[in-house]
Image (cartoon, rainbow, N blue to C red):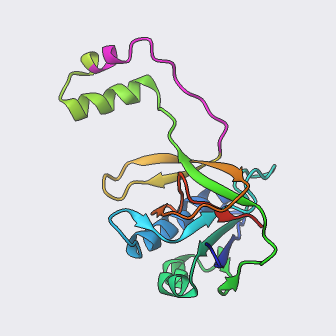
Amino acid sequence: MMKYYIDITLLPDAESNLGFLWEKVYQQVHLALVENKTTASNSEIGLSIPEYGNVSFPLGTKIRLLAPSEKLLQQLDIGKWLNRLTDYTHFTSIRDVPGSVNQFARFDRKHVDASIENLARRRAKRKGETFEQAFKHFDGFEQQETNLPFINMRSLSEGQKFKLFVEREFVDSPNVGSYSCYGLSKQATVPWF
């Protein structure tokens, strides 16, 4: 059960819009979670996006990091990771999750297939096929579209840019589990407040 949290507020200006700040700040949050993971690819720290669905910017201006213990957030030392971005961020001290919380949310990564051409290129590279062979594999494929908000990310292992689509689902009761090193989970929930 998540008992403690830190809010990170993004502070855009004329030169750095919210999309740019989400990309830079979330990349640092991801690195902090990787550095503090509990298993090969899991974290005990979950993420909430309190302004998810905001009309002016779908992800809003806040990132909330939640943990079952104060010690986990202390070890994360988010200030160290956001040091280069101090002009564009503000983060709170560690706070208690309000006891009156009775709603929970699950934030998960939604995989959205890229264009057929991109999928064929990836398949050709992975399987050692020609582009034409790989392209034939996707004959009849319908490209998915989504209106989900996303964060532009860069894979540190491969250097490629990708869109991290984030989906929120409300649930009636908390579900304990692990989170990815993006702070997202297919099962585990976070308190919604």
Quarter of the picture containing the C terminus is bottom right
Report if residue 136 lies within the magenta region. yes
> Is 122 covered by the magenta stretch?
no
Magenta part, dominant SS: loop
- At 25% from the left edge and 16% from the top edge, which residue is drawn? 133
Does residue 143 appear left or right of residue 93 in this picture?
A: left
Q: Is residue 133 above or below residue 38?
A: above
Which residue lies at the image location 76% right of the left edge and 61% below the top edge? 103
Quarter in which the N terminus is drawn = bottom right
Q: In this image, 63 relative to 100: left or right?
A: left
Residue sitting at the far left: 128
Residue 122, compared with residue 104, is above or below; it is: above
Q: Position of residue 90 (x, y in %)?
A: 68, 79
Nearer to us in this view, 151 or 175: 175
The x and y percentages for residue 164 are: 52, 49
Residue 126 quadrant: top left
The number of callouts visible is: 0
Residue at the spot 39% in from the left edge and 72% down from the top edge? 38
Q: Nearer the viewer, residue 18 or 102?
A: 102
**From what the image shows, is residue 122 above or below residue 29?**
above
| Magenta residue span | 134-148
**Residue 37 position by quadrant:** bottom left
Q: Can you give x and y, in whole percent of width and height, for residue 96 in the image?
A: 70, 83
Whole-percent x, y for residue 73 in the image: 55, 82
